[in-house]
Amino acid sequence: MGAEFVFVGIEETDREVVKQKFAELCEQSRYEDGASYSGEIGMFHSIAKWVPGNRTVNEAYEYMEEHHNKWDQAMAVQCDKGWMVGGWVSS
């Protein structure tokens, strides 16, 4: 099995809103892409780790890419545009 790095940017500050929007995106992906080894955002079911901070979008992307593990649920990294949410998924 391979792995894909997938993420979405959510321009919100409220964590509850971010969770809701992410859940909707994941559900839509599972419907469109399937739920088994799709290599898409729908492989996630929740946000397991929140990483606050004042990063640029690129810094948030790099942090997530380096610190997220393939079998974990999504990671949310705060950035100057809101939150970057995602990580490594099976494909």
Image: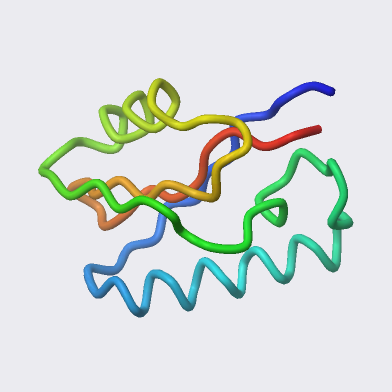
Among all residues in the image, which is located at the extreme left? 54
User: Vertical placement of 82 versus 13: above or below?
Assistant: above
Location of the C terminus (image quadrant): top right
Q: Between 8 and 51, which is closer to the camera in this rendering?
A: 51
Quadrant of the frame with the N terminus: top right
Q: Residue at coordinates 11% horizontally, 43% vertically from top-left?
A: 54
Q: Position of residue 13 (x, y in %)?
A: 22, 68
> Compared to 41, does 17 lie above or below?
below
Left or right: residue 38 versus residue 73 is right
Q: x, y percentage for residue 47?
A: 46, 59
Identity of the residue drawn at 67% across and 37% down: 89
Could you tell me residue 70's position as x and y percent? 60, 31
Protein image colouring: rainbow
Q: How many marks?
A: 0
At x 32% / y 28%, what residue is drawn? 63
Q: Nearer the viewer, residue 81 or 25?
A: 25
In this rendering, would 20 be left or right of 53? right
Report x, y in % for residue 56.
Answer: 20, 36
Residue at 47% across / 78% down in the picture? 20
